[in-house]
């Protein structure tokens, strides 16, 4: 027990935090799942979610005497491409033996391609992308809502809500999507909606995205216009990743399935399925960084 | 001195707070100017700005023995159409004799028309509008950035910055506006821009609006597209105010001059000049609420 090494990979995003615990042989011991872990949105909550997900994995592994202090960890976190937020995460007093901090995009890319080389587009609560070509890392897009993150759940939900408020102000005609969004919000009273939504974080806007997505399939004209804008943006991102020389490009995240179906055929042909999820990429990077001979 | 009444009107917005002090006869005694006073953006700062502007006016009046405790005040504040923020403002322990809280739109409307009846569009840091018809108040638009506030300085600056980041990501072609925005930001490094702008409030985005406005006059295609979107929104707002039955419609705020020139002739014909600024409307409402017989 004393000499054995344990590696934990964390995939931390705006809605949830996934942990994967492996032994030195690369055997899966257990997994853990906790809440939001984007340090840009809420650093204290992100810290707690990481601890919760790691503790759940350690408890589920059922290995007598195993504690968080024995884990060599790679944290893949949204937002830490911004130096100020990377610095926050690097200063956390986490109980682990070793900690490497990198982006959610980096761990996702390693997971998706089983290799450090390739590119990844993530579209879930947020959206962002990343290429690793000849060991040079280039981020494309992201930047967080509302600066960027087009094609994300937050962006889709926000666009739908924005239009809904214009309808309630009698500036635009209603569509079925608007009625469905009001049902999801529990009210069609402008003051009540604004009173709630004035403090919305990305994940709150993202909760409305499924309503917009569903109405694209129902040919709602506003939902379709939102989809066309997001599609155009994500297609430009994918072409940029190809121009950067990425060998293999994958798109992942909660909305990836929807977007892929709407892309033009020549864009779809540029995409390859992700081989493994981000938390596996994070364990691979933890092992690379901390494995003792 | 003991029986004399003093009335203070406050016009509080996202960038500045104006105070106007009058005696019971309606004579101007002094004015005051302080910083941001939008309780939605920063309630503590708004509280302090109101005190600062009021103190400046009292000091400038040079009336021996006059203190804040003798003033009957009307606060016209952005954001207090949302009940939660009105409640914050109503609970402030301000030192004044009497305080009435209403919206920046209400005081602007009374100021602009010299009457409670009419409608007002404000486009400065934020954008919003308001009609008073047969004593019924109706707000149209506003809601705060990013939920609403199309056609505001915050919205224009944000749109310009959003496009700039897409250019730096090599997803869109550069235009002269993009180079000018990078000069205004002091960098064309994406991480540096995002590191700053990730915490931007409305007034920070609004500081970039003049760059976008200037490039509309230079026929920059992106600045022009932003202007067209804002124009279409504000024209719809003005038509809605007319449909509500507003007798007289004025547009005020730092960007009002720019927008007016771009409106279609039939929209321009619906507009009348504002007769007086919002802080005069606020003094009128303070006098109506608190004047002793």
Image: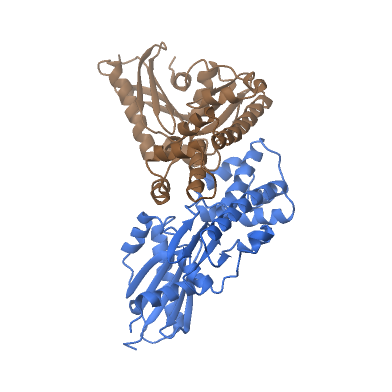
Chain colours: A blue, B brown
Query: Picture coordinates of residue B53 (x, y %)?
Result: 34, 26
**What residue do we see at 54% from left, 58% from top?**
A243
Residue A197 visible in the snapshot: yes
Please name the residue shown 53% across and 52% down the image: A149
Write down the quadrant of residue B242 in the picture. Answer: top right
Q: Nearer the viewer, residue B191 or B95?
A: B191
**Residue A267, x across and y down, in percent:** 64, 59
Is B272 situated above or below A174?
above
Please determine whether, in this image, residue A126 is positioned above or below residue A248.
above
Asked if residue A147 can be seen in this view, the reply is: no
Residue B29 left/right relative to B232:
left
Left-right relation of B149 to B203: right
Residue positioned 35% across, 23% down in the render: B32
Decide: is A132 above or below B48.
Answer: below
Q: Is residue A69 left or right of residue B220?
A: left
Q: Quadrant of the C terminus of chain B?
A: top left
Judging depth in this view, the residue of A62 and B214 nearest the camera is: B214
Q: Quadrant of the N terminus of chain B?
A: top left
Residue B130 location (% of width, % of height): 57, 28
Q: Residue furthest left?
A: B64
């Amino acid at each position: 027990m004393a000499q054995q090494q344990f590696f934990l990979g964390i995939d931390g995003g705006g809605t949830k935090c996934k942990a994967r615990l492996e032994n030195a042989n690369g055997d899966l011991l257990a997994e853990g799942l906790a809440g939001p872990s984007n340090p840009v949105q809420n650093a204290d909550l992100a810290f707690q979610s990481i601890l919760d997900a790691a503790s759940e994995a350690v408890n589920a592994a059922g290995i007598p005497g195993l504690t968080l202090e024995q884990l060599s960890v790679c944290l893949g976190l949204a937002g830490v491409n911004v130096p100020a937020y990377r610095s926050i995460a690097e200063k956390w007093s986490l109980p682990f033996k070793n900690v490497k901090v990198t982006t959610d995009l980096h761990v996702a890319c390693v997971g998706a391609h089983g290799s450090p080389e390739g590119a990844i587009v993530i579209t879930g609560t947020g959206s962002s992308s990343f290429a690793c070509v000849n060991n040079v890392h280039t981020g494309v897009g992201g930047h967080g809502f509302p600066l960027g993150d087009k094609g994300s759940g937050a962006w889709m939900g926000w666009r739908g809500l924005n239009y809904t408020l214009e309808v309630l102000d009698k500036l635009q005609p209603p569509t079925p999507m608007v009625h469905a969004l009001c049902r999801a919000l529990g009210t069609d009273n402008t003051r009540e909606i604004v009173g709630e939504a004035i403090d919305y974080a990305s994940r709150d806007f993202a909760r409305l995205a499924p309503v917009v997505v569903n109405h694209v399939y129902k040919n709602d004209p506003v939902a379709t216009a939102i989809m066309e804008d997001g599609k155009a943006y994500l297609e430009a991102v994918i072409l940029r990743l190809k121009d950067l020389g990425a060998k293999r490009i994958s798109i992942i995240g909660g909305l990836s399935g929807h977007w892929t179906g709407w892309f033009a055929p020549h864009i779809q042909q540029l995409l390859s399925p992700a081989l493994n999820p981000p938390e596996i990429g994070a364990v691979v990077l933890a092992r690379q960084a901390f494995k003792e001979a």
